[in-house]
Image: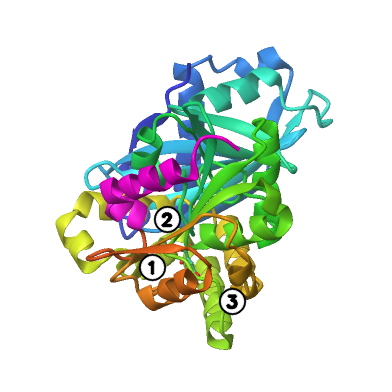
Amino acid sequence: MAPSEIDLTVYPDECDAYGHLNQAAFLALFERARWEMLARGPGMDFFTRQGAWPAVRKSVVEYHAPAFPGDVLRFSQVLVHLGRTSFTLRQTARRVRDDVLMATAELVFVCVDQQGAPVPVPESLQQMMADRQLPGNLRRIAVNGVNLAVDVRGDGPAILFIHGYPLDHTLWEHQLAHLDGWTRIAPDLRGMGQSDAPDLGYSMATYAEDLLALLNTLGVDRAVVCGVSMGGYVVFEMVRRARERIRGLVLINTRAEPDTAEGRRARDTAAAQAREGGAESIASAMLPRLLSKSTRSEHPELTEQVRRMMEGTPVAGILGALGAMRDRPDSGPLLPSLGDVPTLVIAGEEDQITPRDRAQAMADTVPGARLAALPGVGHLAPTERPETVTALLADFLAAVGRAG
Ligand code: MLT
């Protein structure tokens, strides 16, 4: 099997007059890393054996920090889209010494034969990329024209976990590892984590349709759905579309009302920032608002993990989510009608993005809903207070019951 990471050293002859690694030389290092992975895995003649050669149709490189001679860079890659004859790889280069993100590259390949005619992506290439890309319990499941990376664990009645923006399913690690007796399903939404990131086609409706199709594919008729922040917006959309399939609702660090005019303008500003500065600039801007002050000072490792999650999000997915959030409908009118759906609301007392009073308003409006407000917690309760959130969920699931 090909290794998942390759370390390469920057040489003086790759640098410009100022001593920086030259941009074209950097692109060549991305290519070197791909070849090196083949050389140490299935062999450099892999494509010749397949009769299909991946030709680059488009490459987009973002340079985040200058590299100098002697720097050792760690290259890794993930498959972000798999089509019939084409696929897209996202490569990242981090400086080994301090783990700083130096550059990211997104490359679209078309497989061609010896005459240059497009041919289907060979099964063995798909397999090789899928094997390497999906660690642990992750599976790649095709729904609605995209491949979603999905963590599925356990058995029993189902609970679906929906992460927020611009994050991925690893936010739910503690809840996935516990809550035995339930089938825990945590996808990466399209455009985030290791799921495909098409250029277009994002809306709350699309995310919800993806997840309903995912439940179909997994043979799940009804599920408890649990969303954090933007995941909560998706939950509301699922309720609108398929209420009969929802056994219970858990709404964490989220709100029912749509964006204000000012909020909508802020989405457009953030989109311009993402286009200009990439995922890294979004991560730097969001991090102080996502986690509470105490989480940031007491858990630097968690802060770093969340930063990396955000930095790993493809720009297409960031732009798609920003547009989907900006245009989402008002879910307020839905709330009073949810009396027949058991509902738990969880808030962070220090949440700057979806403040506690928004959560309180939701809990007051859904008949029978219960609010748990967590002191010292910001916008990401499942990962800032994992044990508490898991315990709250365990109690809630016990009350919902296993049948039905
Ligand atoms: C999220 O965490 O999913 C987003 O920050 C929510 C939002 O911006 O409305």
Decide which of 172, 17 is in the foreground and name it: 172
Q: Residues within 10 Å of mark 2 (few under 14, many from 20)?
A: many
Q: Residue furthest bottom?
A: 261
Secondary structure under the numbered disc 2 in the rendered image: helix
| Side (left or right) of 334 relative to 185 | right
Camera sees residue 339: yes
Q: Which residue is mark 1?
A: 286
Closer to viewer: mark 1 or mark 3: 3
Question: Looking at the rendering, which quadrant does residue 294 occupy?
Answer: bottom left
Q: Secondary structure at mark 1?
A: helix
Q: Are marks 1 and 2 in contact (CB under 8 Å)?
A: yes
What is the number of the mark on residue 258?
3
Residue 67, position in %: x, y? Answer: 32, 51
Q: Position of residue 373 (x, y in %)?
A: 31, 65
Give residue 357's position: percent from left, percent from top. Answer: 39, 78
Looking at the image, is mark 1 or mark 3 earlier in the sequence? Answer: 3
- Residue 253: image tag: none
Q: CA distance from mark 3 to mark 2?
A: 23 Å
Disc 1 beta carbon < 8 A from ligand 1? Answer: yes
Identify the main secondary structure in magenta: helix
Q: Is residue 64 above or below residue 124?
A: below
Residue at which label 2 appears:
310
Is 390 magenta? The answer is yes
Is residue 29 shown in magenta? no
In this rendering, does residue 21 appear at all? no
- Under mark 1, the amino acid is Met
94 on left or right of 122: left
Q: CA distance from mark 1 to mark 2?
A: 9 Å
- What residue is drawn where x is 22% and y is 49%? 301
Q: CA distance from mark 1 to mark 3?
A: 20 Å
Q: Tell me the SS state at disc 3.
A: loop
**Viewer-side label of 3, 2:** 3
